[in-house]
Image (cartoon, helix red, strand yellow):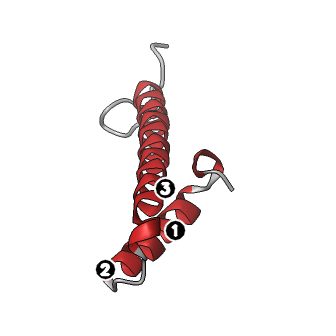
Amino acid sequence: MKEDRKSYSEAIGRLDEILEDIDQSKVPIDVLAERVVEAAGLLKRCKSVLTETEAKVKDVLQDLEKEFGEDGEADEGND
């Protein structure tokens, strides 16, 4: 699966594997560059997911604030 199609959890899991293998010297020098490139792609994917999620959460919070106001009470209108 390509890095840009992995879920956040899958990408983090694979990053953990890569880092653990490198940390324990399990990655042969011949493959090290490939793993570093893969890790960079995974990091970009994670950052993208986090940025998208942050934007969505901000939008939802702004909508809720407009609907309920800052004090948490619903606007009852001016009857």
Q: Position of residue 71 (x, y in %)?
A: 30, 37
User: Which residue corresponds to the image point at 48% horizontal and 25% vertical from the top-left?
Assistant: 76
- Label 2: which residue? 23
How busy is the neighbourhood of tag 2: few (under 14 within 10 Å), some, or many (20 plus)? few
Contact? badges 2 and 3 (CB < 8 Å) = no
User: Relative to the observer, which residue lies in front, 65 or 23?
Assistant: 23
Going from N to C along the chain, the mark reached first, 2 or 3, is: 2
User: Which residue corresponds to the image point at 37% horizontal and 40% vertical from the top-left?
Assistant: 72
Contact? badges 3 and 1 (CB < 8 Å) = yes
User: Which residue corresponds to the image point at 38% horizontal and 71% vertical from the top-left?
Assistant: 29
- Label 3: which residue? 38
User: Relative to the observer, which residue lies in front, 51 or 28?
Assistant: 28
- Label 1: which residue? 14
Contact? badges 1 and 2 (CB < 8 Å) = no
User: Relative to the observer, which residue lies in front, 33 or 67?
Assistant: 33
Q: Quarter of the image holding residue 33?
A: bottom left
Instruction: Provide the secondary structure element on which disc 3 rests.
Output: helix
Going from N to C along the chain, the mark reached first, 3 or 1, is: 1
Q: Amino acid at mark 3?
A: Glu
Q: Residue furthest right?
A: 1
Q: Position of residue 62 (x, y in %)?
A: 41, 29
How busy is the neighbourhood of tag 3: few (under 14 within 10 Å), some, or many (20 plus)? some
Instruction: Provide the secondary structure element on which disc 2 rests.
Output: helix
Q: Amino acid at mark 1?
A: Arg
Q: Residue furthest front?
A: 30
